[in-house]
Structures are given as C-alpha cells and as structure tokens.
Image (cartoon, rainbow, N blue to C red):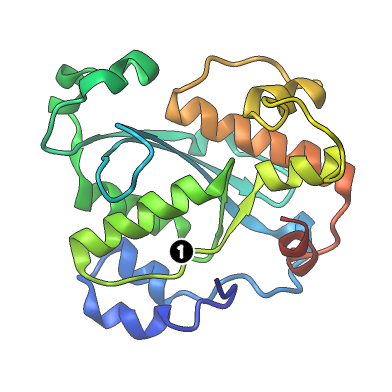
Amino acid sequence: MSWWRPTNPRLADRVPDGGLRRFLAAAPPPRGTPVRELPLLAVDLETTGLSPETDHILEVGMVDVDGLGIPLGTATALVVDPGSEVGQSATIHRITDDDLAAGVPLPEALDRLFDRLAGRVLLAHHAAVEVGFLTEAVRRVHGVRIDLPAVDTLTLGHRALGFDEDLPRDALRLWRLRARAGLPSYRGHDAMIDALGCAELYLALVAELAPRDLGQLRRLS
C-alpha cells in the first residue's frame, strides 16, 4: 500500500461533495513530518463480525491525536444503522437493535469519519480490520477503491516487545499492551473508549520507540 495515496486524488471527482471527497483530495502529511507535530485520527470500529465483505459496521469511535497530545473534546462515537439486525455479535459489543434504530446511515458515517481524517493519518490497533472494513464500505457505497495507509499500534507494540520473542497469545491485545505501558484499564468493545485507548497506547509506544518522523514511524509499523 503506497503511503502517498497516488490514486486517491484522481478518485475525488467520482464521489459526492463532502468528507470523503475532501479526504481523497487532501495531501497526506509529508514523510518528514516530525512525530511531535504529526496529526492522526485514532479510529475503532465495532462490527457484526470479522469479514468486511459480509459483516457490517455498527459503531465508529474517533479521537484526534495532535502530535504528542490527545484533545479529549474530539472523542466521538457514531452508531451506524446497517439496515440489518445485530445478531449474536451483541454479546460482544452490547449494541442492540434498538440502538441501531437511532443510528446514522453508513454513507453519513463514512462522510463524517473521512471529513475528520482529511490531512491526518489513520491510527488503529490491528489496523488491518479498520482498513478492510472502511475500504470495503467505500467500495460498496461509492464504487471506488481507495488507499488507506495506517499506523498500527499492534505492530508498534510487537516491535517494542521484540519480534523474535516467544510471546503469549494475548500479548498484543490492546488491554495487555496498555497494562505493560502502565496505562489504566478501560472497558473493552466500546468504539470511542477503544479509540482513546489506542491513542494513549500510541503515545506510550512513541515515547518508548522514539521514532523521529512519519517516515520512520511508518517503517516501525
């Protein structure tokens, strides 16, 4: 996946005016951006399952990371109405069909998320999940395939622990890496709380790994 998103600007005119178009048209932060100045958006998704092709986004959690700070007033959660029932996944994330009835449609959720992401770097824990669901959702709604590079706290955590180490199965879970960093325990499977938990873990890992700029951060993650 190209960090520079070379195909994205050419796709901007193929989607309606709004947040996704602004994201596609915006230049990503340059590779030389110092980490202390880097704008990111920590994102967490709650879904009905693990397959972007067959499962649905139910909730989007977001919080800005501005350099080495987290403006807590930017923490946001959007419940998404996928037009289907929650099913058995409710036992994990505790989102009910009644909650979905008050949610926003997927196109609106995507528009609001990508408006926040324009000019920023996506940050997530096990980012392949967020990238997979978001790119598939954009393809399904708008018929385009976007590039969505991300910084992954799971990979950063793995590097901090040592790639060659024989790790316990749960060593790279968000809560376990947070405990290792001395961060407080939060309730899991709440999109906004998990996004905030990811953002805090990112800052702890950046302090430990000491990447100089975005280019070095991307090589680490």
Q: Position of residue 57 (x, y in %)?
A: 30, 40
Locate residue 208 relative to residue 34 in the image: left or right: right
Is 168 situated above or below 152?
Answer: above
Of all residues shown, which one is farthest toward the front? 166
Residue where numbered disc 1 is placed: 118
| Residue 29 sits in quarter | bottom right
Please, what is the three-letter code of the amino acid marked with disc 1?
Ala
Name the residue rendered at 33%, 13% in the picture.
91
Name the residue rendered at 22%, 17% in the picture.
96
Q: Which of 53/20 is in front?
A: 53
Q: Which of 132/38 is in front?
A: 132
Residue 207 visible from this viewpoint: no
Q: Position of residue 49 (x, y in %)?
A: 34, 34
Quadrant in which the N terminus appears: bottom right
Residue 7 visible from this viewpoint: yes
| Residue 84 sits in quarter | top left
| Residue 147 sits in quarter | bottom left
Q: Position of residue 142 (x, y in %)?
A: 21, 66
Quadrant in which the C terminus appears: bottom right
Label 1 secondary element: loop
Q: Which of 119/43 is in front?
A: 43
Is 16 situated above or below 171?
Answer: below
Marks counted in the figure total 1
Name the residue rendered at 63%, 54% in the picture.
151
Q: Position of residue 197 (x, y in %)?
A: 61, 29
Locate residue 60 relative to residue 196 in the image: left or right: left
